[in-house]
Image (cartoon, helix red, strand yellow):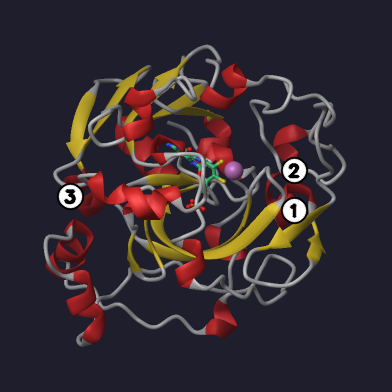
Amino acid sequence: MKQDLEITPEKFFKVRRRFLKLGAGTLVSALMADNLLAAVLKEQELEFKEMNAQEAFALNGELLEATKEEIATSYNNFYEFGFFKTDPKNKAHSLKTSPWDIRIEGEIEEPFSISYTDLLSKVHLVERVYRFRCVEAWSMVIPWVGFELRELIELARPNANAKYVRFTTLYDPKQFPMQGIMQLLDFPYKEVLRLDEAMHPLTLLAVGMYKKPLPPQNGAPLRLVVPWKYGYKSIKSINKIEFLKDKPISTWEAENPKEYGFYGNVDPEVSHPRWSQKSERVIGKRGQIATLYLNGYASEVEHFYQGLDRTKLY
Ligand SMILES: Nc1nc2c(c(=O)[nH]1)N[C@H]1C(S)=C(S)[C@@H](COP(=O)(O)O)O[C@H]1N2
Ligand SMILES: [Mo]
């Protein structure tokens, strides 16, 4: 697939792209047990370096202060476990994240399945500190561990018909109680990006956060992170990725097309029908801060939306 990116990942972050490296000591024991991410990191003999807080800058040079880990892992949206922010942490231990296979199909040269472990051995892990903005007008700052989605897209080799990428969460009511009990949403949860959005180096598949493997409540073992879009686009616990010719409807768009658009771009000028999006509550801090267009990533991604009417949800 031909790539036409005028920008390099280094431009986004003071943190240089690098392999994560696994060091000795407490961190290793915290990561051990049956954890696949730890196993892969160890196998690759990577050394995990402490991130220097000075490196965690936003695009405008502002220092981003990461949300406390205890907060980011206990205040969650994961409707497969319930409506309440505390449900995922309390209930997600039923999710079995290993072994885990990801099915890749659709408009690609050859459909295939790949195990999480094999996939990790084929990509470059990076740490990225991103703003995270939910459509509900709250935000956090998360230090993710993951790889650029475009690496997986290159492995998948989409053909010329591929215009959209659809992601699907595992469907298993035994592990996700709400999938069986009631049709809260049209499960399994699905989300969609345009192929060019998916190829952007800011778009990550996260496998960890706070230098550790993702906890189940945050979407283990593999979840999408698109930092300039509302959180609902960042689908969790993905086990299928499809390349499509025509735009499919995603879960929230089907549920409530007046409130949740296909793009889901963070935009302070476009109100949600029930509340303003001009400001956001930073979880774990007092007060509100102004919401930034495309969540602060406009200089990198606004070209995608030139000519589109921002007030329309599409
Ligand atoms: N499968 C699935 N993915 C999901 C959701 C969900 O309910 N199910 N909620 C979304 C929403 S609305 C948000 S804000 C983020 C929350 O991610 P976090 O809990 O890691 O902060 O996950 C997104 N991904
Ligand atoms: Mo959200």
**Residue 117: which disc?**
3
Under circle 1, the secondary element is helix
Residue 151 falls in image quadrant = top left
Tag 3–tag 1 contact (CB < 8 Å): no
In the orientation shown, which residue stands out farthest toward the bottom?
25
In primary-sequence order, the first of circles 2 and 3 is 3
Please state which of the two labelled residues, at mark 2 or mark 3, is closer to the viewer: 3
Q: Residues within 10 Å of mark 1 (few under 14, many from 20)?
A: few
In the orientation shown, which residue stands out farthest toward the right?
269
Query: What residue would you read off at disc 2?
Result: 302
Q: Is residue 22 left or right of residue 32?
A: right
In the orientation shown, which residue stands out farthest toward the top?
246
**The one of 218 and 127 positioned closer to us in this rendering:** 218
Work out whether residue 220 can be spotted: no
**The one of 4 and 195 positioned closer to us in this rendering:** 195
Work out whether residue 2 can be spotted: yes
Residue depicted at 61% across the width and 53% down the height:
7
Query: CA separation, marks 3 and 1?
Result: 35 Å
Tag 2–tag 1 contact (CB < 8 Å): yes
Query: CA separation, marks 2 and 1?
Result: 6 Å
**Rendering coords of residue 295 (x, y %):** 71, 53
**Rendering coords of residue 37 (x, y %):** 22, 60
Q: Is residue 139 above or below residue 60?
A: above
**Rendering coords of residue 195 (x, y %):** 52, 29
Which quadrant holds the C terminus?
top right
Residue depicted at 52% across the width and 23% down the height:
251
**Residue 299: which disc?**
1
Name the kind of residue labelled 1 in the image.
Ser
Q: Is residue 89 above or below residue 248?
A: below
**Residue 162: which disc?**
none
**Rendering coords of residue 129 (x, y %):** 54, 66
